[in-house]
Image (tube, coloured by chain):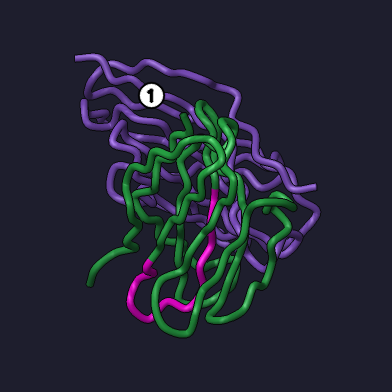
Amino acid sequence: NAGVMQNPRHLVRRRGQEARLRCSPMKGHSHVYWYRQLPEEGLKFMVYLQKENIIDESGMPKERFSAEFPKEGPSILRIQQVVRGDSAAYFCASSPRTGMYTEAFFGQGTRLTVV
Amino acid sequence: AQKITQTQPGMFVQEKEAVTLDCTYDTSDQSYGLFWYKQPSSGEMIFLIYQGSYDEQNATEGRYSLNFQKARKSANLVISASQLGDSAMYFCAMRDYGGSQGNLIFGKGTKLSVKP
């Protein structure tokens, strides 16, 4: 049973370019969470999605960031017109259901570097 | 507001000794879950152990145990018989329904270094 798959593992973008981060949840998981980890910090929640629906995007910056989880295919976190401050590790986690007792399985992360 | 506090930025432990990593939390909810994750230098997040707020016994998973003191709102991770491979960042996290249907709230982490 493959784990949560994120790609690419490393992504370098120039300021002003777009970054697309992909996350394939574990088989049977329909709940996806995106987190951002700045250097020397813990993970910060960005957005929670179920298939074709954004459930909570309270942690997403209001501009340039968007996320989707289509019926078919991986979840995508999209960052438009990247700036140096977007450099971080972006983690995706998936769960089979919601609930406080439900473990979230994390992918290996995508390390975005903006130059 | 929900909050996780890890007061130890870095810890050292001698190989084969036990170590306790501190975690305190703040929530007004009665129902919540507490998690510990390990992040080695390679960067992935590895789930270690879980404690539910209604669990009467402390959780254990192999060499990991969670010292849960509900009245003090603490959930310390105890690693017994430390190994060199335990050197990593350790994050405490909480999930409750005060947040958005179950997203995790993380502390800033503790960097554990195991000395040979």
Q: Is residue A25 magenta?
A: yes
The image position of residue A108, as x and y in percent, is: 34, 50
Q: Quadrant of residue A67?
A: bottom right
Residue A6 appears left or right of A75: left
Query: Which chain is green in the picture?
Result: A
The image position of residue B105, as x and y in percent, is: 62, 49
Near-viewer residue (B62 or A101) = A101
Q: Which residue is mark 1?
A: B112
Give the residue type that dot 1 points to.
Leu
Chain ID at mark 1 = B
Res. B108 in view: no
The segment highlighted magenta reads A24-35
Near-viewer residue (B54 or A16) = A16
Query: Which chain is purple in the picture?
Result: B
The image position of residue B43, as x and y in percent, is: 34, 38
Residue B14 appears left or right of A67: left
Check the picture and name the quadrant holding the N terminus of chain A: bottom left
Near-viewer residue (B46 or B62) = B46
Residue B113 appears left or right of B36: left
